[in-house]
Image (spheres, grey):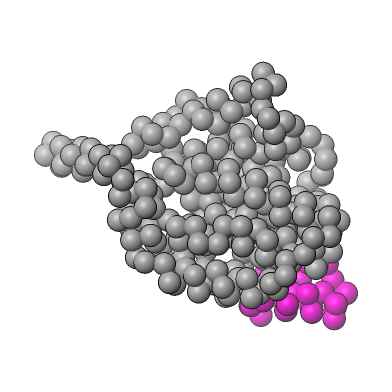
């Protein structure tokens, strides 16, 4: 059975006396025809891949355009010097989001969550918590199921593709997944998860996808930071008892509608937004010139 709404997940939780993550686990077992152990082993390997990607980052790699690389290390060093205004956990999240998104731009192994372009958001909020000893591996795996369920619902009702729905569909969805995972890790209930998801999506509603020269580099890498910090804010608000006035499934539907209404120039075509600036056009021209030279060789 496909996870077609947050309401459906909440109803199954109540009907079958299951936790959010267990509903998603059961759905995965049914859809892929695998055992509980096999499903959980797969999710654990996903978590291990996220950790491996975080550990492998050195900041020395550069992207195809040369515009991306090293910022994650700059942020780590800035944090080490005690300079960060955010301090503590949030400054670590910023560094991890940059590092992971840079790794994608530099063709390193990452976990698409839900897409490669938004790969930095979910691990950015989880890896620092784990490194701090605030949560154990079992809790992380459960939270990843929560995130996966949220992503499945958004994908079903709206979109997780920048080409279909703009960056709100990629980084916005990743932020919603991360927000729900954080609420679950803090012991929040289904209603709080729903409110966190709704607020995370609303905060990035309408965000366009305008990659310079068509590369998942600028502004994509730094938008992962915004997605991660947005997730933390939404999770904290939900845990504090702050509610989204618009129900979560309606927010998801609205995001899908907004995405469909975005002009094609703002949906991953590199024809509008930052891609159409003089800087963006110069990067595109240099890339095309380099391609032409390579073809002549």
* Residue 220 seen from this side: yes
- Residue beneath the point at 65% across and 58% down: 200
Relative to 86, residue 150 above or below: below
Rendered location of residue 55, percent (x, y): 62, 33
- Residue beneath the point at 56% across and 26% down: 73
Q: Mostly what secondary structure, the magenta segment?
A: helix
Relative to 130, residue 159 above or below: below
- Residue beneath the point at 37% across and 48% down: 274
Residue 247: name its quadrant: bottom right
Q: Nearer the viewer, residue 18 or 275?
A: 275
Q: How many marks?
A: 0
Q: Which residues are magenta?
A: 1-30
| Residue 29 on the magenta segment | yes
Rendered location of residue 131, percent (x, y): 75, 35
* Residue 29 seen from this side: no
Q: Residue furthest left?
A: 296
Q: Quadrant of the N terminus?
A: bottom right
Q: Nearer the viewer, residue 130 or 267?
A: 267
Q: Nearer the viewer, residue 5 or 32?
A: 5
Q: Quadrant of the C terminus?
A: top left
Residue 65: name its quadrant: top left
Rendered location of residue 80, percent (x, y): 67, 21
| Residue 160 on the magenta segment | no
Q: Residue furthest front?
A: 245
Q: In screen coordinates, is 283 left or right of 242?
A: left
Rendered location of residue 70, percent (x, y): 49, 28
Q: In screen coordinates, is 114 left or right of 104?
A: right
Residue 175: name its quadrant: bottom right
- Residue beneath the point at 71% across and 50% down: 233
């Amino acid at each position: 059975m496909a996870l077609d709404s947050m309401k459906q997940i909440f109803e199954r939780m109540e009907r079958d006396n299951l936790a959010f993550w267990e509903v998603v686990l059961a759905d995965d077992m049914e859809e892929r025809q695998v055992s509980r152990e096999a499903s959980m082993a797969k999710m654990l390997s996903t978590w291990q891949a996220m950790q491996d990607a975080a550990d492998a980052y050195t900041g020395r790699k550069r992207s195809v355009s040369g515009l991306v690389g090293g910022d994650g290390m700059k942020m780590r060093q800035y944090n080490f010097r005690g300079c960060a205004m955010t301090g503590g956990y949030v400054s670590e999240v910023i560094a991890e989001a940059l590092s992971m998104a840079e790794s994608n731009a530099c063709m390193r192994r990452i976990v698409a969550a839900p897409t490669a372009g938004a790969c930095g958001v979910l691990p950015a909020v989880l890896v620092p918590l784990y490194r701090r000893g605030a949560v154990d591996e079992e809790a992380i795996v459960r939270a990843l199921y929560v995130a996966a369920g949220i992503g499945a619902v958004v994908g079903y009702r709206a979109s997780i593709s920048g080409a279909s729905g703009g960056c709100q569909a990629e980084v916005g969805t990743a932020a919603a997944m991360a927000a729900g995972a954080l609420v679950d890790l803090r012991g929040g209930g289904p209603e709080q998860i729903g409110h966190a998801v709704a607020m995370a999506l609303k905060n990035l509603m309408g965000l366009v996808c305008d990659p310079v020269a068509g590369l998942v580099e600028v502004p994509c890498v730094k938008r992962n930071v915004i997605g991660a910090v947005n997730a933390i804010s939404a999770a904290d608000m939900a845990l504090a008892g702050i509610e989204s006035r618009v129900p979560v499934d309606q927010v998801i539907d609205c995001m899908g509608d907004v995405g469909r209404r975005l002009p094609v120039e703002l949906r991953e075509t590199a024809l509008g937004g930052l891609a159409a600036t003089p800087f963006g056009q110069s990067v595109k021209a240099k890339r095309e010139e380099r391609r032409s030279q390579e073809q002549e060789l």
